[in-house]
Image: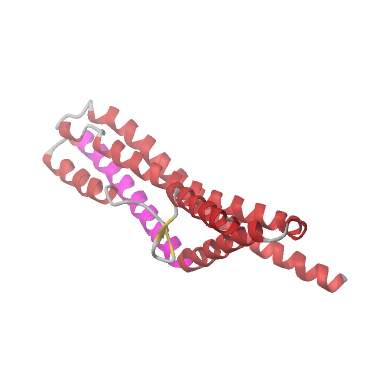
Amino acid sequence: MVILAGQELTSILVVAGYDVIFIFLFSHTTAIYLMLSKDMESFSELTGKFNESAEMRSLIDKRLRNYIKRHSLVLLTVKKLQKLFSVAIGVVLVLNTISVCSFFVLPLEVAFSFAPLVSYTLTIFFLYCLQGQRLINASEGFETAVYCCGWEKLGLREQKVILLMLKQAQKPMMLHAAEMVPICMATFASTMQAIYRFITVFSV
């Protein structure tokens, strides 16, 4: 019993640790995007005071370099997250869907013993999709902040730099499970609909 309990505890800790790390990385990347958006909003105050002085140009250039560097790091982070977790998340989502479908077709007395597992899988699935949606919303907010930063008041050189950053920001920032399924709330809703239809058909 001690050995079995140790195995179960180890499995729970490993799985829970994996989920916590992934959700934390999601949240961290989203927070960086939100901070970038706030900084771009404050940058618009600086562009309103723009003049042709060397000091002002130096300050604008320094701020733009900082934004570009941080945005590049965020894009690299998302790319690495996609590479590291894409297949694993795809497997998790498929297994979670099968678990939920199996739960509702089992006899009632058997299904209750699997209720904690199903609750956990649904919660994790929801959190994955929620964090994915928050990342999408944050990247869209950053795109809007870049466009509304007052670039039209700057010199031609600065406008070209902001245009390049805007083009990068306009690319959809979305992670995919198994390189195919977008991780967002729309996926969660469509999956719940599919599970409901399966259960309805099976029960009939």
Indicate the quadrant containing the N terminus: top left, top right, bottom left or bottom right.
bottom right
Foreground residue among 134 and 30: 134
Which one is in front, 125 or 20?
125
Res 17 → quadrant: bottom right
| Image coords of residue 69 (percent x, y) | 33, 51
Which residue occupies the extreme bottom position in the image? 3
**Residue visible at 73% across and 67% down?**
10
Left or right of 134, for residue 117: right
**In this image, 109 relative to 36: left or right?**
right
Vertical side of 15 occupied by 120: above or below: above
Q: Nearer the viewer, residue 122 or 10?
A: 122
Find the residue positioned furthest to the right: 1
Residue placed furthest toward the front: 204
Spot occupied by residue 91 in the image (x, y as percentages of width and height): 52, 67
Give the residue drawn at x 61%, y 50%: 123
Asked if residue 28 shows in the view, the reply is no
- Identified at 30% across, 49% down, the residue is 68
Residue 71 counted in the magenta span: yes
The secondary structure making up most of the magenta span is helix
Quarter-of-image position of residue 62: top left
Residue 189, image x, y percentages: 47, 48
Indicate left or right for 180 with 19 as reference.
Answer: left
Number of numbered labels in the structure image:
0
Q: What residue range appears in magenta?
A: 55-84
For the C terminus, the quadrant is bottom right
Q: Quadrant of residue 37?
A: top left
Q: Position of residue 23 (x, y in %)?
A: 55, 53
Residue 35 sits inside the magenta stretch = no
Is residue 9 at least partly visible in the picture? yes
Determine the residue positioned at 39% across, 42% down.
Answer: 137
